Amino acid sequence: MAFSSFGDWLGLLATTALAQELAGSDYKKANFAIAGVFIVRLLPAVFLGPIAGVIADRFDRRRLMIVCDILRFGLYLSIPIVGNYLWLYTATVLVEAVTLFWSPAKEASVPNLVPKAKLESANQVTLLASYGTAPVASIVFALIAIAGAGLKHTKFATPADLALYVDALSFLYTAFVVYQLKMLPRGAADAKAKSENIGKSLFEGFKFVKSNKVISGLIFGMLGAFFAAGAVIGLARTFVGDLNAGDAAYGILFGAVFLGLALGISLGPKIFGQFSRRRIFGASLTVSSFFLLLLAMVTNLVLALFIVVLLGAFAGLSWVTGFTMLGLEVEDEVRGRTFAFVQSLIRISLVGVLAIAPAVAAAVGRHTFNVYHFHVSYNGAAFTMFGAGLISVTVGIVSYRRMKDRPNISLWSDIMMAFRGELGAITGATHQGVFISFEGGEGSGKSTQSKLLKEYLESTGETVLLTREPGGTDLGVQLRGILLANETGHISPRAEALIYAADRAHHVYSLIRPALDAGTVVITDRYLDSSIAYQGAGRVLQPSEVARISRWATEQLTPTLTIILDLPAEVGIGRLTSRDRLESEPLDFHERVRNEFLNLARVDPDRYVVVDAQQSVEAIQEAIRERVAALPLLKINKTDKKA
Ligand code: TYD
């Protein structure tokens, strides 16, 4: 398999290079010629794929594979010998058609060669053999190009010819290897005929995909990714030519993409493992599209290589996340059809892009602008890549938004949490409800304002639960007694933090989470930010550690919106008629609390709103309502849209 795939990749590089060579110095012709090679490579799969699978199942697999390899040997050998467009394309179609018979025979043979328990490892080896050989082939291609450069002006052979000869030999060798695998079962008897044709599988897949928001977002994104990939692949040879580089550079650029892909696929999911897959997918697609935009703007080959590795890495990350999600989110009985649908769509969109991109590139042509003493060249290939980049950035952003698993928590909040090293906060269980917390120092008017907000939301048709901390539950009432009674006296700051966290854990578990799951809007008078401010900053523990305890206690339940009622500590304390245990703390304690609240709000404006609590009750409530009304999940916003 490795030899055969190596041959495939080398063949792809060599035929595209040959297409460019045959076109001579005509930019238009070169673009179309290369696109032609890709298109004819994909066409057989689009039309013949399912039929070939069925036919392949009727033959002795081993013999079929040997025959296919010998045919491919002959076809690749003939391309440089004949040496014209017509045969280049004809032979390419034929090679592809032959491969369509070879692949199912190989696919079907593997499960017979390895025990069931090892099948997964076998699949990994298969992937490695089919894609891991691409960078090897590109290096070999580059070496051949360098070695063959000397031959360029002899009539004997060009680098592309040389690569095709090597390629032909690799297939001959594959035939020999398979010939020696005498224990391969013939297979025809246990064949499962897949008689579904491409049209039917397309339609069935489409029906399912349309009904599922996440899957459709996913597939939309994958199409975007392949759209961009198609543009890069189709334009790479002319792009490299525009940078005044030749076949060797083309081989290296090609290899760099695959190096990046391999890095992204193998390391990416581990590095970004704390983020949810749905977020990684759209985000990494967007990032890799940005690199595509960057690539289109550089005019330096070395720089281009680095960019291409990064582009490949993020594309690989979104590719592997996408496929994993597709496997996880699609139920078993429709999985086959959905995969078939996706693969057909991908092929069709690749053919489309490969046909359109060079046309655009050719239409734009080559331009050099002279600005004073500088020559600025801008060529069709780069221009078209830029366009493809713009489209795929848009696709990435749209699919990110579509698949957001927690629409009530912003990307910015996620990023801020990640920066603070609190990756755990990002992976919390999802909820669809609206969760609002009130925070602030002593005497800031939280109780009054939260009651008014509750009344307002109820008037808009929401079911609202107003609760508070500490003391939202029966257990909480007892803990509140301990925490606030002056008789408790001084207790260890850590013990205090843990008691608040215990109150919160039970509060979320028994009251808040069930209410949110039932679609209730939950308003709480104080939540975890109070612990961060009072125990973290006030008691001088590490705020991030205090936060972590609460995150663990609440299983990462984070408010949709946190309203901070802000006023100077002395004003708030001055409003009190009696003082409990915490209120009796000195003024600088309360100043630290206030500052911590403001700090929290400053770094995450998406989640926090700070309201000046020295205004009138009505003015404060007005400011709160304005912000709350902007929350997308509320009924007012849903009815507004209909109206
Ligand atoms: P508060 O909610 O202000 O109630 P009241 O308005 O009836 O006095 O009182 C709760 C007190 O507990 C307040 O002083 C802040 C403190 N507190 C913490 O120190 N950490 C926490 O995590 C929470 C929720 C409150």
Image (cartoon, helix red, strand yellow):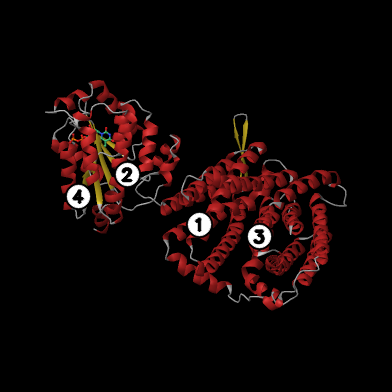
| Lower position in the chain sequence, tag 2 or tag 1 | 1
Give, as a three-letter code, the residue at label 4. Leu
Pinpoint residue 339: horizontal percent, then vertical percent.
Answer: 55, 64
| Lower position in the chain sequence, tag 1 or tag 4 | 1
Residue holding disc 4? 457
State the CA–CA distance, disc 3 to disc 4: 58 Å
| Lower position in the chain sequence, tag 4 or tag 2 | 4
Pinpoint residue 561: horizontal percent, then vertical percent.
Answer: 29, 42
The mark found on residue 118 in the picture is 3
Q: Residue furthest left?
A: 577
Is ligand 1 less than 8 Å from the beta carbon at label 4?
Answer: no
Give, as a three-letter code, the residue at label 2. Ala
Q: Against 65, is 132 above or below?
A: above
State the CA–CA distance, disc 1 to disc 4: 37 Å
Seen in the image, is 267 located left or right of residue 86? left
Seen in the image, is 615 located left or right of residue 201? left
Quadrant of the image occupied by residue 308 = top right
Residue holding disc 2? 505
